[in-house]
Image (tube, rainbow, N blue to C red):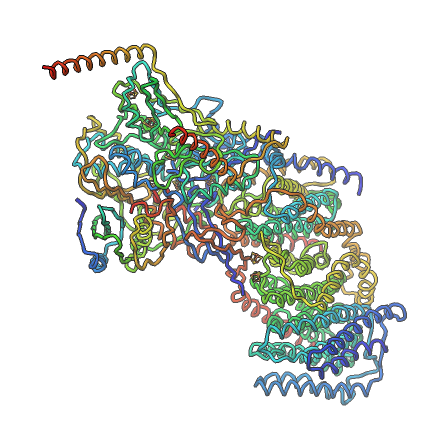
Amino acid sequence: MTFANFTKTELKNLFRKPATDKYPNGPASLKESTRGHVSNNMDACVLCSVCQMRCPTGAITVDRKAQTWTIRPFSCIQCRRCVDNCPKKSLSMQKEYTEPDQIKKEQVFDLSDRQKEVLAEQARQAAERAKAALEAGKKKSSE
Amino acid sequence: MSVLSFLILFPFFIAFVLFFLKKDSLVRSFIVFIGAAGELSLSVYFAIDSYLYHDIEMGTFYLSETHDLDMLIAALELCLMLVVFFLAVKYKKYPVMILSALGTIPALYMDLTGKSTTMASHIKVDHLTVIMVLVVGVVGSLICMYAVGYIRDYHRHHKEFRDRSGYFLSLLFAFLGAMMGLISSDNLTWMFFFWEVTSVCSFLLIGYSRTPEAVHNSFRALWMNLLGGCAFMAAIIFCIYVMEITNISQLLVYASLPTVTVFPVAMLAFAALTKSAQMPFSGWLLGAMVAPTPSSALLHSATMVKAGVYLLLRLSPMMCGTYAGTMVAVIGGFTFFAASLLAITVSDGKKVLAYSTVSNLGLITAAAGCGMEEAVWAGIMLLIFHSVTKSMMFMSVGAYENSTGSRDVEDMHGMIVRYPRLAFIMTIGIFGMSVVPMGMCVAKWAALRAFIDSGSVYLTLFLCFGSASTIFYWIKWLGKIFSVSRGSERHKDNVPAVEWIAMYPLAILAMVLCLVYPLISALAVIPYIQNAFSGSVSRLVTAAFESGSAGGEGIIAAISTEDFIIMGVMLICICLLPVAMKMVNSVQERQVLSYMSGFNSGNDRSFYDSHGEEKDQWLSNWYMNGLFGEKRLLPFCLVLSSAFVISMMTVCAIGGLFI
Amino acid sequence: MTEYSMISVIIYLIFAPFIVSILSGVDRIVTARMQGRCGPRLLQPWFDLIKLFSKESTAVNGIQKILVMAHCFFAIFSGAIFFAGGDILLVLFALTMAEVFLILGAYSVNAAYSEIGAQRELLQMMAYEPMTLLTAAGFYLSAGSFRVTDIISGNVPLILKMPGFFIGFCFVLVVKLRKSPFDLATSHHANQEIIKGLTGDLSGPVYGFSLLAELYEEALMLGMAGLFFLTSDRMSIIAVFIAIAVIMFVMSLIDNIFPRVKWETLLKTEWIVTFFAGGGNLIILSLIRK
Amino acid sequence: MAAKRSVIPFGPQHPVLPEPIHIDLVTEDEKVVEAIPSIGFVHRGLEQLVTKKDFGEMVYVAERICGICSFGHGYGYVKTIEHIMGIEPTDRARYIRTMLFELSRMHSHILWLGLMADAFGFESLFMETWKIREKILDMLEAATGGRVIFSIMRIGGLRKDVPDDVMKGFLPELDKVVEGIKACEAAFLSDPAVLGRLKGVGYISKEDAIALGCEGPFLRASGVEHDNRMRGYAAYGDMDFKIITSDEGDSYGRCYVRIHEIYESASIVRQCIEKMPQEGIYVPIKGFPNGEHMTVIEQPRGGACYYVHASGKKFIERMRVRTPTFANIPALAKTLQGCDVADVPILVVTIDPCISCTER
Amino acid sequence: MLDGLEIVELTGLLNNIKAVKTDGFSLMQICATKIDESYEILYTFGKGYDIRNLKTVVREGEHVPSITDMFEAAYLYENEIHDLFGIAVDGINHDYKGTLYRTAEETPFR
Amino acid sequence: MRISKSPWLLHYDGSSCNGCDIEVLASTTPRFDVERFGIVNTGNPKHADIFLCTGGINSQNEDVVRQIYDQMPDPKVVLACGICACDGGIFKDCYNILGGTDTVIPVDVYVPGCAVRPEALIDGVIKALKILDEKAEKMKRGEYKSLTSAEYAEKLKGMKTASDKEKEDENA
Ligand code: SF4
Ligand code: SF4
Ligand code: SF4
Ligand code: SF4
Ligand code: SF4
Ligand code: SF4
Ligand code: SF4
Ligand code: SF4
């Protein structure tokens, strides 16, 4: 039993630099692996909706008509499931977290023009293939 | 003289009449009213008369030849003894018979042989007498008025007891008369007689309801008081046979010879300790709480217990630095401290008051035992303030009980809204008992100074610790009164008008006294002290004189004019509070619920409990029974104080008789 | 009232809250540093106070508000008597009166935590009052008067005559400055079983009044601590400042190296210290005097 | 005659306990004569999510049963499924899981120490412990990417590898943590003022502790040598550690057990890092689970049971978690009788309540 | 796949549990699972590292006896089962009567 | 004198998983030390300026949250901390979760994160302080009074019926 034995620790602390981070006057302490927010590389996304299906909180909406990929950061629990499951590896986890805000904003990513072309090209090809198949079918049936 | 004898005899007369008016009637109420009002005005008249037309500086003496009266008194004494005998046999409490006989028979003998009178007069009126007459007359009479209304309600609530209210009222008046006799007697035998009358009256009052508890408590009160009576008798015998004196004032002449006076003083002091319910004897006063409230108020606050401290204050010039003085001071200080702790542990309003009475009497006792002028000054002041405030407290508790059926402090929750008028009285009472600038505290202040001056460390310590504890139980009581929950409504109190007639003047008196006490001090208390102490310049007092702080001037200096003005300002501020309350309340603001961990069920009274139901929140005060509980602390205190009293008495007896 | 006392009262009335705010700001920074943190700004306590007065005033009932204001008034009042050089016993009694109003205010809201706080505050008063009264007695014995003006007119600092009283008084200070281990009735750390105790149901300006009163009260308590060091010599004022600085430092250290005790421990500790330190010193002083 | 008892609500909103637990307290002075706890303020009903989220997605829900033992809950659920599906994770996964589990235990125990200090009014001790805890959070973040929710668990192994150099970097940090805790230990276990608040407070005898089904440090503090890690799941079978017990049975004993468990955990983490096997971190899975199983693992607060009932579909039938706090509540209710009001927070904290997982 | 699993009739439940108690086991948990129209109740007991499970099947409307006489701490589990599954449990020593969880949806697992 | 120099904070754990709570608590400890901004963690609604709510709202705690909010004196701000408090998070499909904090009281700042990081919390508080100052300004001019929880419920009802109507229109 030693009386008031915390004195030493306290006095040591008193004459040491405080352990406090500088934030917000300095940088936030983010690690390499920190899961912050999800971002989409719209050059690679094919709007396949796998991420939307996988997201446990339904934070992602893929709108193929408007060609947008939307995330609601105020619903995202940073589980990284979408990132892991994206077939095109277009999603990535950034280490910066979403800024607090007064309203629950959505973040809409428009497909990059290049990718739009790519997709449009793909769609055309797909349509052609479908058409071809259809015609082939017709032929068959007519035959 | 005629005024005085009227003052003593008039209550007896009223008592006699009331004894035969068994039924509650307008006539009876009227007679009580007349009796009380008469006694009150008489005592005031007497005081003025004494000041204007008599020499109260040195004391006015009456009745030096009293053979016939002595015979009458002897006869009455015999009657008293017979009453005690009768009841003792009836309830099979035989030991009290011995005590009664031990006290009465020598008195009879001396009265009959004429030993009890020398040429000295039997009655003496000086400043202290006037003060006491005023206290007893004013407070006591108001209590009698209060009693009329009270006893009626009492019997309405307690159908199980036989209505003997005529007898009750008659006893109250008899008591008043006895007190008047006691405080004006100079002759020890006479004093003894009145002393015994008060003992027996209180005994009868305590046993009023005749429940086993009441009977038991009344006999306890009786034997303790009779034991004191025996000691009183021993002192008388010593005075008459050894010192050949019969009067207190003669005894006081010997003040500078402590070896001579130590025995009678010790014996009288012992008697006073029993009467004032000091520590080993405090039990009877607590037990006396079974009696209807007016008798509690009368016995405990205004009168009977004051007889003890009155005697001590009279004897105080002989106590400074003597063994008897030490005994009294230590017991007083100890009682002050211990009883305040005990008062913390009880929640029955009357019991709190009883303990607080014991405690305050302890302080007065200590002041008397200390024997310094300043201390005596404080003692007398305490006595005055205490009588007024405490009787008011008792009355309001009684009125509350009659209105709600409970006198428990815990049930006084939110009283300020429910019964504002009664709460108002109680608040004044509690403030009066506990905080500056009200009287009690001021007197305590003077006492503290005196105790320090007298160099008695133990008294200083007792006072410091005791007054800290005092605050605790008073303020928690007051807190209960102030705990208001939203939505509680004003109830109609069924307090009869006569009770208000008694309570309002006392409340006003309590406030006024705070403002006029310098006047009382200058007019009565200081002159008395200067006279009383002129013949007895003990060593200690001399020392105090030299340091320039004792004597009349010193006492006033204890509380300077400046301080007095400051206190006046404080008092006025407090009085302005209700007004401020009205003003502030007129400003509208958002009302929020009281905090209940976020689970308030919509009003300030209940929350949702673990079963999702509304549950009433109940808040109770602390009683610290684990620490100072009656079971734990009381036996210890009794043993300690008994041991101390016995050893000190032995020392005094041996010292006084054989050396 | 002499000119001096006039001036000191005015200084007290105007500057005491500000000065004490800074002192407690320093205290908070030192505490934070001891805990390895940066801590708040120096004027933080002052900001807190000002903020409260600009908040909405909500109340549980009207009685509470006036009682708290009365508390504030009497707290300031008792300090004023002290700094005017008045009777120290009267100061203590007036302070008690002020406390009583605060306690009643806490009772008046009929809320569990306020009431627990009120009971504990009462208990604390019961615990420390003997010591404050004894300290007054000590001053009286060693300076021959209860008046502050007389007490400070000696030639030697009274601490030399009254070390026991000083020790006891420091225990009182721990309670009055509401420091751990004795901060039972409210708590200056937000982490205890009662939520700010008896101030728990005050909000906005009303709470502001109680904080203001607390600042004045602290000024008074520190002033009383200063009495132990002040003499007729002007330079002794420096000693007073040093003493107060040391006291404040020791208080924050104590605050940081103790857990909170329970009420029984508080009562017993305070009374035992009072009895031995205060009583012992009292005996010695009485003997010397004879 | 009015009762000299107060009836007061304690919680759900209460400063000493961020946990919304409610207790009806009946007190006499400051003594508690009756205490009826109530829970349910955090009840979300997440066990029913099995009908809405498939068995793989449920891992994320399981991790969020509690943010303090997040890792443990994830592990418990995953292990149960793995058992049902007959999957044996790789050695490296087992070791990393063990390491993370023990780091979580350390952070949880240190957190508890802080709250305990807070409960008896020792603010600077609270600050000191939490200062130390940040080091462990840094390690966890470096390893998993999250400070409190790790999202690293997957059925069949781990979702992400922890690089060896990162783990090596933990070793010196661990020493610092242990050193810091040693300083705090002095205050917790040998300062008379602290002892006054801990010794004899909330005593539970060995027999009672067993009969009431207590768990974890609470149980061990009553002298029962029981630690589910001894069942040898994950890599505990390969580790060298001992069960800490104390015979005090009171709050002091609980402090003692937890402080010494921190040292043990640090040693386990070290062993894991030193013996870390080098191979893949997960085995692929196929199909859906079918069957039922109950896993018992040792969470920081004691044994937790995970019960899964699956019938070969994508959505499992039932998942149930019985958490240690739930098991300790009856004992808490018992210790509260007769304590002081000032001790209520201490007692509530001694079971280290995680109401979140208790109510799910 | 459960350790020491034993399936018992509802009527013999108490006796079986008594036997378990006599063997020195203490209660670990009680939980219910809804299987089609009936409920399985699983009692888990532990002694050291041994585990024993008792399972009983309760049909809609059937009452389950409380085991709080034997295992004091069972009250929380039994209340929970009552609140979430709506299974009536008779004779709980501390019956919250459906207020342990005050849920938006009554007996959500029913 | 700005009110934001002394923001006192009250934290209530709605039905969070504790993850956010310990981060809130961590932000008061040496590493993040929010006392730098004068923030004191009071725990008493009557002293608080900032209400920091973690976790979603369930049917047992909705009244508690409302009551705490109502007991706070104006001006006050509410911070919803963590995804659960923002919109119910991963638990929003649970039968007992009504939604985020904004289902019962008005929220001024949403702080996302699961769990919310202390740094994010600091950012959120700083944002909230600006709002607090604005409210104080308006209050001084008598233009502002915060909604009580009951008024807020009314407002929500109004909003809902409006949007419901739209939906109905669409359907029609
Ligand atoms: S982000 Fe990946 S998963 Fe999502 S839509 Fe684009 S490509 Fe598909
Ligand atoms: S990180 Fe998780 S929650 Fe966030 S968007 Fe991706 S899957 Fe959804
Ligand atoms: S208010 Fe209620 S509790 Fe109080 S006395 Fe009247 S009836 Fe009794
Ligand atoms: S709270 Fe109860 S006891 Fe108090 S005044 Fe209201 S009704 Fe009467
Ligand atoms: S954790 Fe500590 S600081 Fe935070 S609310 Fe609780 S008691 Fe207050
Ligand atoms: S005891 Fe529970 S609520 Fe408290 S900090 Fe730990 S996990 Fe959070
Ligand atoms: S026991 Fe508590 S801390 Fe551990 S996982 Fe459960 S909820 Fe979390
Ligand atoms: S947001 Fe995430 S960490 Fe925070 S309470 Fe919800 S689930 Fe827990």
Query: Does B170 sit above or below residue C135?
Result: below
Instruction: Report x, y in % for residue E108.
Output: 32, 45
Q: x%, y% of residue D67? A: 36, 36
Picture quadrant where residue B448 is located: bottom right
Name the residue located 25 percent from the left edge and 29 percent from the top edge: D158
**B6 to the left or right of E98:** right
Q: Quadrant of the N terminus of chain B?
A: bottom right
Residue nearest the observer in this picture, B323 or B434: B434
**Is residue B321 at least partly visible in the picture?**
no
Query: Which is more toward the observer, B145 or D244?
Result: B145
Q: Quadrant of ligand 4?
A: bottom right
Q: From the viewer's side, name the closer residue of A45 and C8.
A: A45
Q: How many marks?
A: 0
Residue at far left of view: A143
* Residue B516 is at least partly visible in this image: yes
Residue found 22% across the figure and 46% down from its top: E35
Residue D83 sits above or below residue E13 on the image: above
Quadrant showing the C terminus of chain B: bottom right
Give how far across and how far down residue A112 sits, in percent.
Answer: 34, 12
Q: Is residue A91 left or right of residue F98?
A: left
Vertical side of B254 occupied by C259: above or below: above
Q: Quadrant of residue B402?
A: bottom right
Residue F138 location (% of width, % of height): 60, 30
